[in-house]
Image: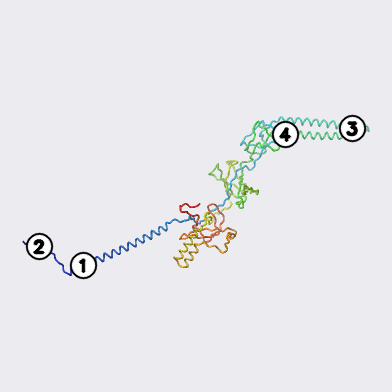
Amino acid sequence: MNCRAAARHAAKPINPSPRLRAFKQRRQEKQLTKLKKRLSLGLAALALLAGGAGWMQQQAGKSSKPSPFRVSEVDEGAITQVVMANGNLQPVTVVTVGSQVSGTVITRLVDFNDKVKKGQVLLRLDPANFEARVRQASASMRAAEAQVAFTRGNYERNESLVKQGFLSAPQRDQSRRELDAALAQVEVSRAQLDAAQTDLANSVIRSPVDGVVIKRSVDVGQTVAASFQTPELFLIAKDLREMVIQTNVSEADVGQLREGQQVRFVVDAFPSREFEGRVQQFRLNATNTQGVVTYTVIVDVPNEDGELKPGMTAQTRIVVAQRPTALRLPTAALRFVPTEEELKLNRDKAAGAANAASAPASAAAAASAVQVNRPDDDGVLSTLRGGARVYRVYTLDADKRLQAHEVTVGIANTKFTELISSGSLKKGDAVVTRRVPVDGKAEL
């Protein structure tokens, strides 16, 4: 009974007092307010983080955007300017050995590449005809000498008879004329004999110089015909330890050539080896081939080891100027010229900078972005300054705008050009060398 009464008593709800209910309600309101504050702070921090991330991503995207131009730095270093030309190696002296007489070759004693001495026998022609002529001329001279003896004796007798009064003077004078004619005939016969002996001697072909046989045009059994033009039997190079290169240089480059300039060249037979020589002669006789004017330049080449052969093609580089240390920029920078679209983009960027900056800053931005011509720039004569041609090269500012710089240059090659007057350019500045198209392939 007591247990049931206790259970009914425990199940009966207890009504809290009004003060307790108000306390609980205020406590719940405070907790809700704190929760709302924390939620607001969290949302604000999240928004701030999202904004910062977006800004950083934007800056990263802006900085990672590829430049539309390729650039290269101005530096200091050596520059060598050369004139390039092709030519052929040749012996210094080549002697053509011919024949003054005609005949059939019966003996050939030398061949290609044989070394010969001056006076050495190279070949012999058939001497039969020449020996016969010598005998004939010799007989003619003996007959003329006999005639001289006869006419001299006749003259002497007539002279004696005139003194004795048995013969007239005209008869004596006639005998004198006959003697003079006989003496003259002896001289003719002697000359004919000399000519026949000379032809016999010329039937033996000898070397006129010391050298090497580089060409042979005849063989045993061939007939040599010496008529209006001396036939070519052999070509003999006098000395292959000294050779020359005969090159053809364009008229645009001859103003830089001087005798004694260093020449470097390679030949196909030794592609990994570079040979050296010196400019020996500049010939004034120009050659005009289809409107292209060239001049012949002779280069002396030592060939002590004999590796260079006649006829080899030599790719020469004539050193016309050198600088061991010079301020230089890439030669490609002189060839870069901005397009109208690029200049318009520069002006648009300058206008944007003017709207976002103060008046002085906008004026400076516009001046750096737009290509401004000098008042004295007439487009023709003003391209020369102090006798040197003026070029425009371009750099990029922080906003990737093109900035023009006028410079004068000195010696140059395909890679580097010497800066004589650099204006505002200095060592380390990056100059534009070429543009990069949309497909990412830079122009050549």
The spot of residue 410 in percent (x, y) is 57, 56
SS category of the residue bearing label 3 = helix
Q: How far apart are marks 4 and 2 (CA)?
A: 168 Å
Residue 291 horizontal/vertical position (percent):
62, 49
Q: Going from the N terminus, do you reach mark 4 or mark 2 first?
A: 2
Describe residue 177's horizontal placement relative to residue 442 as left or right: right
Q: Do the residues under discs 2 and 3 have CB atoms within 8 angstroms?
A: no
Q: What element carries label 2?
A: helix
> On the image, numbered disc 2 is attached to which residue?
8
**Which three-letter amino acid code belongs to the residue tagged 3?**
Asn
The residue pinned by badge 1 equals 25
| Mark 4 neighbour class, 10 Å CA radius: few under 14, some 14 to 19, many 20 or more | many
Question: How far separated are the C-alphas under marks 2 and 3?
Answer: 209 Å
Q: Which of marks 2 and 3 is in front?
A: 2
Compared with residue 40, is residue 294 higher up or lower down, i.e. above or below?
above
Residue type pointed to by label 4: Asp
Alpha-carbon span between mark 4 and mark 3: 42 Å
Which kind of residue does numbered mark 2 sit on?
Arg
**Mark 3: few/some/many CA within 10 Å (<14, 14-19, 20+):** many
Q: What element carries label 1?
A: helix
- Which amino acid is tagged 1? Gln
Q: Report x, y in % for residue 66.
A: 44, 55
Task: In this rendered view, identify the residue nearer to me: 12 or 329.
Answer: 12
User: Which of label 4 and label 1 is nearer to you?
Assistant: 1
Closest to the camera, between mark 4 and mark 3, is: 4
**Picture quadrant where residue 323 is located:** bottom right
Q: Distance between the residues labelled 3 and 1?
A: 188 Å
At which x and y percent is residue 327?
53, 57
Tag of residue 199? 4
